[in-house]
Amino acid sequence: MNILKILDKLSDDKFFTKEATRLETITGISNFGKKAAMSAVPLGLGVLMSTPAKAETTSSSSAMAFKSTLTDALQLALTLEYLEDEYYRIGLATPGLIQTADRAIFSQISKHETAHVAFLKSALTSLGENPKSKPTFDFTVKGNFMPFTDYQQFLILAQAFEDTGVRAYKGQAGNVMSNKDVLTAALQIHSVEARHASEVRRLRGNKGWIELANGGNMPSATDAVYAGEGATVQAGFNTASAFGPEAGSASFDEVLSGTDAAAIAGLFIVA
Amino acid sequence: MKKTISVSNQGATLDTNRRNFLKLSGVGLAIAGLALVGCNDDDMIIDNNMGPVFDLGKGDVGVLNYAYALEQLEADFYTKVVNSFYTGITDAEKQVFTDIYRHEVIHRDFFKAAIGGAAPNAILPTLEFQYPNVDFKSRASVLATAKALEDTGVAAYNGAGRYIANADYLVIAGKIVSVEARHAAAIRDLINPKSSDFSGDDVINAMGLDLAKEPKDIVAAAGGFFKTPFTWKERGIS
């Protein structure tokens, strides 16, 4: 597409003023990002006409970098949702694993994770990105865990996944805040994961919230999920002064960086 | 004699430089609409609106004050709960309510300190609350009210995120909302254990998304608890 056609499109009033549904808004923004990126390369017509491939692959424009941070966040979220979705599907399908009284809880959780996978795939598609395909998971981590033969281990990993999910979404909020609809949806998923986490924790005899950096009868292999959760200073305010560090640390959940979240998920991915 | 004063904090801004987190610059107070109406002894004008109505403010100040208002409500409610536990409360339930009470007080005090430090002339004052339909002696009544407050808190934070400009404030809001969601699930679990209610279809839709509500819808829904009125003109609440 040559530069003159790009400029024509940008001056098309309809592009800027049409009423849009939420997903259309996302699409509109994503298309705008693509076109802006192409026009950010040196404007010598010779460059565009002779090397169109070079023009499209530049990574130096801020519009592309902005959008890449946003879509990277969604790809990470999708990976985590694939993980949870598959985990609960297998768990629910394994005869005799989940105690009958608890099935309604895990059916509900599973239903949500399936919905989250679908939602994130369509959000990425709307943004012009191909959603990553589902990785191959090994929830036994080369035989170190037996979540599908031992219900207590199933619960342990479920708690770890949910508490990780809460922290991971929180860690990406800044990366998606450039798109208010995506941000809102991320918040709406994030609080669902927190509800899940609370319930699974309580099933295990824990409180629904995390006190100190202690997951609550969790194996040391899951330490990374809770590292930093003992924080008792928030923006300079001492949260422990009123009632001590347990209440102080529990009143705020902590972020997990994309790198740390990916590392935790990576333990369970073989390909 | 009747006079009307409306106080706004037009011009209040927050320095959004991350290194100056929560530092304020350029607070302006505008006093508008002062009107004196003379009357004689034969005209009795009964005015129940006895003072100025606080406006939450503009930009991030407004959002922080909004969060502060909701945390004040929750802290107030749970203080009443723990000061007089309902009849027949179990030890496990006492622990849950004591923990939630502590968290909400911490949240409230956090916002008081943060906004008070950054925007001392624009901070929401201490509000008064009322619970006309709540029976603090009744387990069902207390649990139902707690459930409504926690779900409201989640929906409020989820709906307000888009209005936050400063990324650090957004993270703070994120750190709090997930705790409110943990509270909500726990309360719902107490009401209907071992069911799907902890994350029920009444709050989570077919796409797996929790509630997110506009500030004016939250204030309309929770307004009955607020005895002290306030406005948030920037978000259409007047």
Image (spheres, coloured by chain):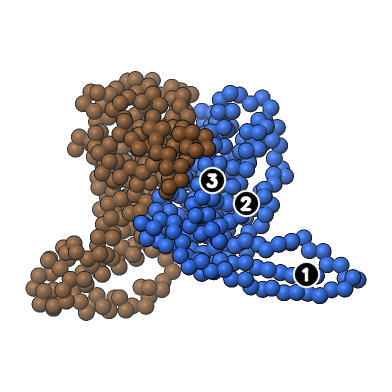
The residue that label 3 is drawn on is B109
Residue A5 location in percent, x, y? 23, 77
Decide which of B96, A7 is in the foreground and name it: B96
The residue that label 2 is drawn on is B126
Q: As shown in the figure, which amino acid type bears the numbered disc 2?
A: Thr
Kindly identify which chain the residue marked by label 2 belongs to: B
Question: Answer yes or no: do the residues labelled 1 and 3 have beta carbons within 8 Å?
Answer: no
Dot placed on the residue nearer the N-terminal end, 1 or 2: 1
- The chain coloured brown is A
Residue at image position (17%, 71%) is A41
> Judging from the image, what secondary structure is the residue with disc 3 in?
helix
Decide which of A28, B37 is in the foreground and name it: B37
The alpha-carbon separation of the residues under discs 1 and 2 comes to 25 Å
Q: Give the colour of chain B.
A: blue
Kindly identify which chain the residue marked by label 1 belongs to: B
Q: Residues within 10 Å of mark 1 (few under 14, many from 20)?
A: few
Total label count?
A: 3
Q: As shown in the figure, which amino acid type bears the numbered disc 3?
A: Asp
Residue at image position (22%, 66%) is A61
Q: As shown in the figure, which amino acid type bears the numbered disc 1?
A: Lys
Residue at image position (40%, 56%) is B21
